[in-house]
Image: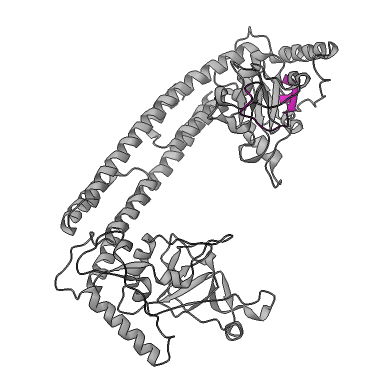
Amino acid sequence: MNLADLLDEFNIVIDTAEGLTELRSLILGLAVRGKLVSQDPNDEPASELLKKIEAEKKRLYKEDEIRKPKKLKNVSDEEAPFEIPKNWIWTRLGKTANDVHYGYTESADFEISEPKFLRITDIQDGKVDWKNTPGCTIEEDEIPKYQLHNGDLLIARTGGTVGKSFLINDVEYSAVFASYLIRFIPTFTDTSEYIYKYLYTKLYWDQLYESTSGTGQPNVNATKLSNLLFPLPPLAEQHRIVQKIESLFAEVDVLEEKLNRQTKLDEKLQQAVNAEVQQAPDAGSSKSAWNFITSNFDTLYHTPEAIDNLKKNILNEAVRGRLVPQNPNDEPASELLKKIKAEKQRLYDEGEIRKPKDLPPVKEDEIPFEIPESWEWCRLGDSILDIYGGSTPSKSNPQYWNGEYYWASVKDLNDDQIYIDKTIDTITELAISKNKTKLVPADNVIVCTRMGLGKINLNTVDVSINQDLKALILPKSVSHLFFFYVYKTMEIIGSGMTVSGIRQDELLKIPFQFPPLEEQHRIVQRIEELFDICDRFKAQLEQRQGVNERLVKGLVGEVLEGN
C-alpha cells in the first residue's frame, strides 16, 4: 500500500483529531526515513553536503564571523535507529549549524518598538504577531549577537513548551530573542526547512524526552540539542521532501476541516435536541424528547465527551422534576420532611444523635429554578439525620494501622463510581477507641469538604473517615441514590487561602430540592435506564474507536513496509 492509498483509507477510518495527528506523524516519519519521495542517483550525496558545511564553517571561523565550531562525534552504525538510503548520512544535528546558543536576558518592554524581543509566549500556533511583540533594552554592540535572521530556528529550552520550535521567516523588524530560547543557525539556510520538519518528528521528540528524563524541570540545553541524531539527505532531496510534506499536510488539513465541520454539525444537533428536552413544559413532553434521543443515539452522539455531557443533562433534568411525570397520589414532600424531623427528634431523645439545629427556610432569592408543586425546597441538613467528621490516627504509631476497619480519605472517593466498598488504608480497633473516630454504618453517604470538594460516594461497608470527609446519615425513608444524584449536580463552593473547603454549617444550609419519596424512586429508575443506554453506546463507541486505531496502525505498518 502506498501513501495515496492510505490517505483514501484515512477518509474512511479517521473520525478523531488523534487520528489526524497519527497521520501527520506518519508522513514525517516516512520523510526522515527516506520513504516519502524517491531518490535521484544524480543528486549529490549527503556526505558531500556535510563536507561543504564543514568547509563553510571553517571559512567563517577563519574570517572571525562565527565562534570556533565544537567537535561532535560521528554517528556509529550501532547508534543509527533505522536504515536510511545509501546517499543519505547519519550525523549530529549540531554538525549542520554554525552556532547553537541561548538568547538575551532582559525584561520585555511594550514601550520599545525595536528591536523586538521574541519570547516563548509570543510564538502561538507556529506564528508570531510581530506587530504586537514587545521590545527590550539592549546595548547597540550586543544586537548582532542576538539578531534574528531568516532561516534561524528557535527552540524552547525549558518548561511546558520544551522542544517546541519556530522557523524565522520574513522578519519585518529588527528582532532579538529571549534567554529561554535556543537559536539554531543552519550553515546553509537551504537546509532550514528540512531541519524544521525534522523538529516535529517522533525521532526528534523521542531523543528529546530521553535527554530530559529524570530531571525535575523539563529542559534541553545547546549541548544535548547539538548531539541529537539527524538523518541528512542530499540537498535536492531535502527540497523534494519539504514540498511533499507540505502537499500531503494540505490534504490532511482538508480532512481536518471536514472532521471539524462534522463535529460542529453534531454539536449543533445535540444542542438543539438538548434544548428540546430543557424546554419541555412537563415531564410527559420531556419523556418524548428523551425517547427520541434514545432511538437516534448513534446518529446524535459520536464522542465519549458528548455522551458524558448528555449524562450531565439527564441529571439536570432529573433534579428539576422533568425526567418523570408527577403522580398526584404521591405523599407530598412536605409530609416526608415532617417525618424526617420527627425521626431526628426521637433519635435525640434516645441519646443517639446530638440536638438537631433548626435551619432557616429557603428564601425566594436562593431558589435557582422552579420545581413541581409536590416538591419542596429545603436545606441539605433538613434531609439528613446527622453529620459528623473523622480524624487521622497518628501515622507514627504502627498499632493504629493495617487493622480490621476500613479508613477512608479523599483518595478513596471516586467521581466515576457510586459506592465505596473498600479503602486503601485500614485502622485497628485501638485507633478507633484512642482517636474517638466513629465508624460510619454501611448504607450512608461520604462527602469531601476539603481537597476534592464536591466528591460523594455511598458506603456499602462500615468505614471510618479522615478530617477532610463528612459522613451524612440519611433516613431510610429517603432514596440514597436520589440524594447522591442531586448532590452531584450541586455547586459546592469552598473558601480558604491554601486549601479550598466548606464548613459543616455552610454545607447543611445549602438549598436542596426534595420530591415525594415515590417519585425519588421513579427518578432513580429513569436515571439508571438512561445512563445504561449512555454507557452501552459509549462502550460501543470506544470499542469502535479502538478498532479504528488498530486499523490505522495496521495501515501505517503496510505503508512503512511497502516503501
Q: How far across and how far down the image is residue 559, in percent? A: 50, 27
Q: From the viewer's perspective, is 450 left or right of 32?
A: left
Above/below status of 190 relative to 352: above
Q: Nearer the viewer, residue 540 or 188?
A: 188
Q: What's the residue at 73%, 12% (across, down)?
A: 48
The quarter of the rendered structure image containing the C terminus is: top right
Q: How far across and how far down the image is residue 117, in percent? A: 65, 26
Q: Nearer the viewer, residue 290 or 229?
A: 290
441 in the magenta segment: no
Q: What's the residue at 64%, 16% (across, down)?
A: 150
Above/below status of 488 relative to 381: above
- Residue 133: name its quadrant: top right
95 in the magenta segment: yes
Q: From the viewer's perspective, is 16 left or right of 62?
A: left
Q: How far across and how far down the image is residue 37, in percent? A: 55, 17
Q: From the viewer's perspective, is 1 left or right of 222?
A: left
- Residue 368: name its quadrant: bottom left
Part of the protein shown in magenta: 92-113
Q: Nearer the viewer, residue 489 or 141?
A: 141
Observer able to see residue 234: no
Q: From the viewer's perspective, is 125 left or right of 262?
A: right
- Residue 61: name its quadrant: top right
The residue furthest front is 111
